[in-house]
Amino acid sequence: MRMFKILALVAGLGLSSLAMADEAKVAAAADLKFAFDELKVLFEKKHPEHKLEMIMGSSGKFKHQIENGAPFDVYFSADVEFPKALVASGHAVAPVTTYAFGRVVLWSAKHDATKLTLEDLPKDTFRKVAIAAPDHAPYGLRAKESLQHAKVWDKIEGKMVYGENIAHTAQLIETQAADIGIIALSLAINDKLKSKGGYYLIPAEFHEPLEQAYVITKHGENNKAAHAFAEFMRSEDARKVMRRYGFLLPGETVE
């Protein structure tokens, strides 16, 4: 009888532990791809009771999917306005938390972008120029704004090719389906792409700020892993990883 009570207690503790564990589906902007590869491992090491499933893609498309009932628990957007809209419509729960400010760069696997500027893009050397689709990808919209600021958009619009998101845009340039293009700094400084070409950092004043924010969705309101990951993103360990990928973090300024 005593052994039975002990086994029952152990089983009860196991069920209690299991009840406290969760798996969170994280919808994240594609510029976070390499940073989140690291952060997922780091988070799950620190929180072995929780698991994360990372789904990377277009911020705008994720917003529409969440509005239509997609079962994401946390949403990391490259544009702060998208999470704000989800809170306003009741599809996410406040607060909306800014986690980083992004930058855009001119990058090529075929040409030395470190010696180029946006004003070079109308040249015949560049037959195809890639950016993410401006209608749903924040990095694509900032790329378009930068090209308009440099007064070259009208000159090169006919040779533009559009990526589904910023990671797909980088892939188009990496495979030389496009000669050159504008991608996220966080992708260009990853070892994989850094080894294939340098970049030109587009001045921040060329475009509106890329304020990026996350929010817990209505679906994830009671998901412990979702809340734990949101809290983890405010930790110094997470901030160190984000800094290494070129993100400017809340409370910090450009040196």
Image: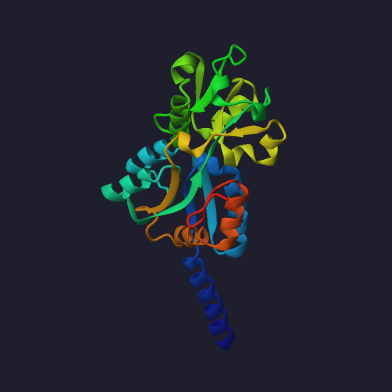
| In this picture, residue 103 sits left or right of residue 75 | right
Q: Position of residue 114 (x, y in %)?
A: 66, 30
Q: Does the image show residue 165? A: yes
Residue that sits furthest to the top in the current view: 124
Residue that sits furthest to the bottom in the current view: 2
> Image quadrant of residue 113?
top right
| In this picture, residue 192 sits left or right of residue 220 | right
Above or below for 79 versus 237: above
Q: Position of residue 236 (x, y in %)?
A: 57, 62
Picture residue at 63% right of the left edge, 33% below the top: 199
| In this picture, residue 59 sits left or right of residue 201 | left
Picture residue at 27% right of the left edge, 49% below the top: 88
Of 53 and 9, the residue lying toward us? 53
Of 220 and 36, the residue lying toward us? 36
Above or below for 154 versus 187: above
Picture quarter with the N terminus:
bottom right
Picture residue at 50% right of the left edge, 75% below the top: 12
